[in-house]
Amino acid sequence: MEIATMLSLGFLVLVIITLTKTARIVPQRSAFIVERLGKYAKTLEAGFHILIPFIDRVAYKHTLKEEAINVPSQACVTKDNIQVVVDGVIYLQVVDPKLASYGINDYRYASIQLAQTTLRSVVGKIDLDKTFEERETINVQVVEALDEAAKPWGVKVLRYEIADIELPATILDALEKQMRAERERRAVVAQSEGEREAKINISEGQKQETINLSEADKMRQINEAEGKAREIELIATATAEGLRRVAEAINTQGGQEAVSLRVAEQYVKEFGKLAQTNNTMILPAELSNIGAAVAAITKTLETARK
């Protein structure tokens, strides 16, 4: 009984081992490489598979997902002989599990080494100032070199990203001074631009003010001239109207006598004013005779009327 039990247990263990070697479940987005008697037989995709026990074996297991592999920091020398420390990340994916198994021993390690070598070469062609500005260009060049080299490995390099660029302390200090000087220069330029704009605005304001004052003075003079012209016109009209009425009054009955009386009154009044002053004047003898003077003036008016 004991021998039979032991044989049964041994058979059970053999069955379990056989099932383990025979039945394989491949997860989604994975691929298993099967070798038969040490030679490549087939590639198992996701799902359930049956193998020949003790003849077939799973030699390699690969994930078909995109992988992010860290590239360790390394020292690179720029075109202007400045040493910088750069690290990054590679994003790659296995597209051919068979080549990834037999094309190279370790495609991850090989990708890292190739990325470091390519990065040193690319950085060595660029000046320090442009290493920060042309990160995208560096990334593209590294991806192109890696992707071309990784084709025999069954690997597709999707992208490379520079994670950090570390500069020496002396270079950082120099860059800080340069940036400080640039900021100060921009501040001075901005201040000078502001002062220039202010002066321009002030001069434009003064110019406009002068124009406005001259326009106002011009309008004032025009208005004054128009006012004086209107005043002269009105005075002339009034004077003409007055003379016309005087002429009409003279032609009426008793008008001549009234004019003679008015002339006599004005003559006496003005002659009296002359007598009140201390001036010495020489007058014709006829002007002392009021009647004769009035008669002469009256005669003059009649002649003008005719």
Image (tube, rainbow, N blue to C red):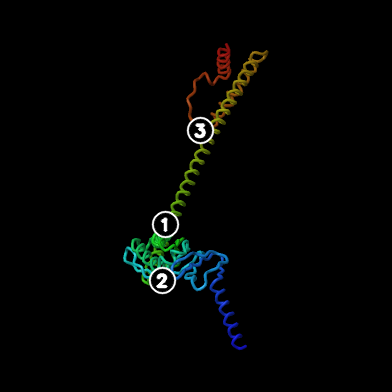
The percent coordinates of residue 33 (x first, y second) are 48, 67
Q: Amino acid at mark 2?
A: Ser
Q: Amino acid at mark 1?
A: Val
The percent coordinates of residue 234 (x first, y second) are 60, 26
The percent coordinates of residue 186 (x first, y second) are 42, 59
Residue drawn at 52 percent across, 18 percent down: 286
Q: Is residue 52 above or below residue 204?
A: below
**Is any part of residue 83 visible from this angle?**
yes
Residue drawn at 58 percent across, 18 percent down: 294
Q: Earlier in the sequence, mark 3 or mark 2?
A: 2
Q: Which residue is mark 1?
A: 189
Split into 4 quadrants, where in the image is the N terminus? bottom right
Does dot 3 land on a helix, a strand or a loop?
A: loop
Split into 4 quadrants, where in the image is the C terminus? top right
Residue in front for this viewpoint, 63 or 49: 49
**Image side of residue 180 versus residue 56, left or right:** left
Q: Which residue is mark 2?
A: 73
Residue in front for this viewpoint, 110 or 190: 110
Q: Earlier in the sequence, mark 2 or mark 1?
A: 2
Asked if marks 1 and 3 touch (Cβ < 8 Å), the reply is no
Q: Which residue is mark 3?
A: 278
Within 10 Å of disc 3 (Cα), the crowding (few <14, some 14-19, many 20+) is: few
Question: Which one is closest to the eye, mark 1 or mark 3?
Answer: 1
Q: Is residue 31 above or below residue 19?
A: above
Q: Amino acid at mark 3?
A: Asn
